[in-house]
Structure formats: structure tokens, C-alpha cells
């Protein structure tokens, strides 16, 4: 019997807030403001708030749409 070795993910699926800050180039205050306003989706695992990679992509798409609306 051969066991399959799982592939290593190039990108994480969940980011801690401090990592999302780095990825989005935003301050902690701005990240939490966006979370509070419902513009950046998060999940909780125990006491840890995590930002799904899909939520980061959705947030960037939202920013791009808003930038397009202003032109």
C-alpha cells in the first residue's frame, strides 16, 4: 500500500490579521475597520480571528470596482 503525500500549498487558505495586514499593505486599524463595516470577511477558530484568502480576493475586487466607479 502506498500513501499519497499531500501537496504543499503555495498560498495559505487562512491568514492571521497581522498577515492580512502585510498582504493588503494596510494598518491594523484599517483592517479592523473594514471587518467591522462588513467589507472584509473573517472567520474565528477559537479566539483567533482569521481572514480567508477568498475574502482577501473579494475585498481587492471590491476596491477595484469602487475605483472603477469613481472614474
Image (cartoon, grey):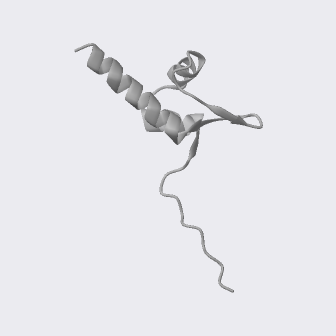
Choose between 49 and 39: the one closer to the eye: 39
* Residue furthest to the bottom: 1
Is residue 19 placed above or below 30 in the rendered structure?
Answer: below
At x 54%, y 66%, the residue is 7
Residue 27 lies, with reference to residue 15, above or below; the image says above
In the displayed structure, 11 sits above or below 34; it is: below
Q: Is residue 32 left or right of residue 62?
A: right
Outermost residue, front side = 1
Numbered marks: total? 0
Residue found 60% across the figure and 17% down from its top = 36
> Which of these two is toward me, 32 or 39?
39
* Left or right relative to 27: residue 70: left
Q: Position of residue 66 (x, y in %)?
A: 34, 18
Quarter of the image for the C terminus: give it. Answer: top left
Q: Residue at x 59, y 68 (%)?
A: 6
Q: Whole-percent x and y of residue 45? A: 73, 39
* Residue sitting farthest toward the right: 46
Q: Residue furthest left?
A: 71
Q: Quadrant of the N terminus?
A: bottom right
| Residue 33: x %, y % from top left | 55, 17
Residue found 66% across the figure and 79% down from its top: 3
Task: Name the residue nearer the viewer: 57 or 47.
Answer: 57
Amino acid at each position: 500500500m502506498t500513501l499519497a503525500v499531500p501537496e504543499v500549498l503555495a498560498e495559505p487558505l487562512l491568514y492571521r490579521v497581522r498577515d492580512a495586514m502585510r498582504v493588503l499593505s494596510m494598518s491594523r486599524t484599517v483592517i479592523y475597520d473594514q471587518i467591522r463595516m462588513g467589507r472584509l470577511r473573517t472567520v474565528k477558530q477559537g479566539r483567533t480571528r482569521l481572514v480567508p484568502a477568498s475574502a482577501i480576493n473579494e475585498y481587492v475586487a471590491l476596491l477595484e470596482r469602487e475605483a472603477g466607479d469613481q472614474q
